[in-house]
Image: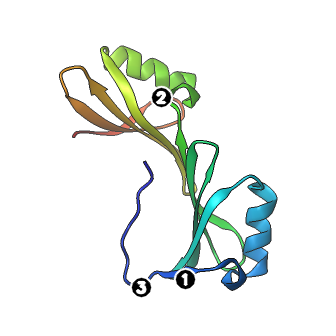
Amino acid sequence: MLLNYSDSSAQDLSYRDVPSVILNAFQTKFRNARDVEWEYKHGYYEVEFEIGQREFEIKYDPKGNILYYEEELDGKQLPAAIQQTIRSKYPGFYIKEAEKKDSGRVTFKVELKNNSGEEWELILSPSGKILTKKLD
């Protein structure tokens, strides 16, 4: 699940309020987007949307450059190296949620759970290296 931060300085925008350079960049890359919601906050434009069953969040600077990209993934879409790390270090756990994040460096956030109810949140590199882990 994508994170939604409540921010009193955020301003909801309609399509007509989004600068054309940003809207064009978005529409060119994400033609099939639906349930599109725009906000302006802290000097950047944020868009949340869906394609198929997956949720996305992107932050653009005023020139239309992507500052941050987040995509919800199915566990099978994770890189093979990450899947191998999970199988070897967390046997008996299944992937509850997975996200790909890119803010200049690509990472993957994976939430794991086992049948006993134990839950872990991992941040991994594309090569499968665990960068952070915490018990939920």
Provide residue 110's location: percent of width, then percent of height: 40, 36
Q: Nearer the viewer, residue 41 or 37?
A: 37
Mark 3 or 1, nearer chain start: 3
Choose top left, top right, bottom left or bottom right for residue 85: top left
Instruction: Specify few, some or many for label 3: CA neighbours under 10 Å numbering under 14, 14-19, or 20 or more.
Output: few
Measured as percent of width and height from the top left, residue 76 is found at 54, 25
Please say if 120 is above or below 76. below
Of marks 1 and 2, the one in the foreground: 1
Q: Position of residue 5 (x, y in %)?
A: 38, 67
The amino acid type found where label 1 is placed reads Gly
Badges 1 and 2: C-beta atoms under 8 Å apart? no
**In the foreground, 47 or 89:** 47
For residue 16, which quarter of the picture?
A: bottom right
Q: Which residue is mark 3?
A: 9
One can see residue 105 in this view: no
Three-letter amino acid code of the residue under disc 3: Ser
Name the residue at 36% across, 23% down. 94
At label 2, counting other C-alpha atoms closer than 10 Å, the crowd grade (few under 14, some 14-19, many 20 or more) is: some
Give the side of residue 68 with respect to residue 89, left or right. right
- Earlier residue among tags 1 and 2: 1
Residue 128 versus residue 83: which sits nearer the camera? 83
Q: Amino acid at mark 2?
A: Gly
Question: Which residue is label 2 attached to?
Answer: 128
**Closer mark to the observer between disc 3 and disc 2:** 3
In terms of sequence position, does the residue under pointer 3 or pointer 2 come before the other?
Answer: 3
Percent x, y for residue 117? 19, 27
Residue tagged by mark 1? 43
Say which element carries label 1: loop
Of circles 3 and 1, the one toward us is 3
